[in-house]
Image (cartoon, grey):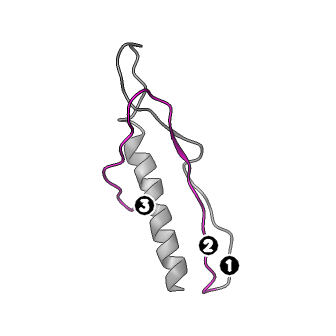
Amino acid sequence: MRNATLTILVLLMLVSCVLLATPTLQAATDPTETAPAALFLETGYLFPAVVEGTQVVHDFVIRNTGNAELQIKQIKTG
């Protein structure tokens, strides 16, 4: 149960990062300007019901489609 709880906590942190980073990491409108741009292939995931103690894992992919380094400096859980 502890592993599943820890895994879910980490995933919640990643989802929160998505929600916090999206408004501030948009592509630059001027092509000469450099800025990171976070592209999230999905912003949430609903785990199926599992037997207690079963470890569940899900990867969230974040791509930088901008033309500058994308830095994730803080993650908050919800």
Label 2 close to label 3 by CB (< 8 Å): no
Task: Point out the image quarter for the N terminus.
Answer: bottom right
Three-letter code, disc 1: Val
Which residue is at the far left? 73
Mark earlier in primary sequence (2, 1): 1
Mark 1: secondary structure: loop
Three-letter code, disc 2: Val
Region of the chain picked out in magenta, as a range: 52-78
Three-letter code, disc 3: Met
Mark earlier in primary sequence (1, 3): 3
Task: Point out the image quarter for the C terminus.
Answer: bottom left
Read off the residue under disc 3. Answer: 13
What's the distance in space between the residues labelled 1 and 3, CA to CA? 21 Å
Judge left or right: residue 50 versus residue 69.
Answer: right
Mark earlier in primary sequence (2, 3): 3
Image location (x, y in percent) of residue 4? 55, 78
What's the distance in space between the residues labelled 2 and 1, CA to CA? 8 Å
Name the residue: 46% across, 57% down.
Answer: 14
Label 2 close to label 1 by CB (< 8 Å): yes
Read off the residue under disc 1. Answer: 50
Name the residue: 58% across, 58% down.
Answer: 59
Name the residue: 61% across, 78% down.
Answer: 55
What's the distance in space between the residues labelled 2 and 3, CA to CA? 15 Å
Tell me if residue 28 comes above or below residue 9 in the rendering: above
Read off the residue under disc 2. Answer: 56
Q: Nearer the viewer, mark 2 or mark 1?
A: 2
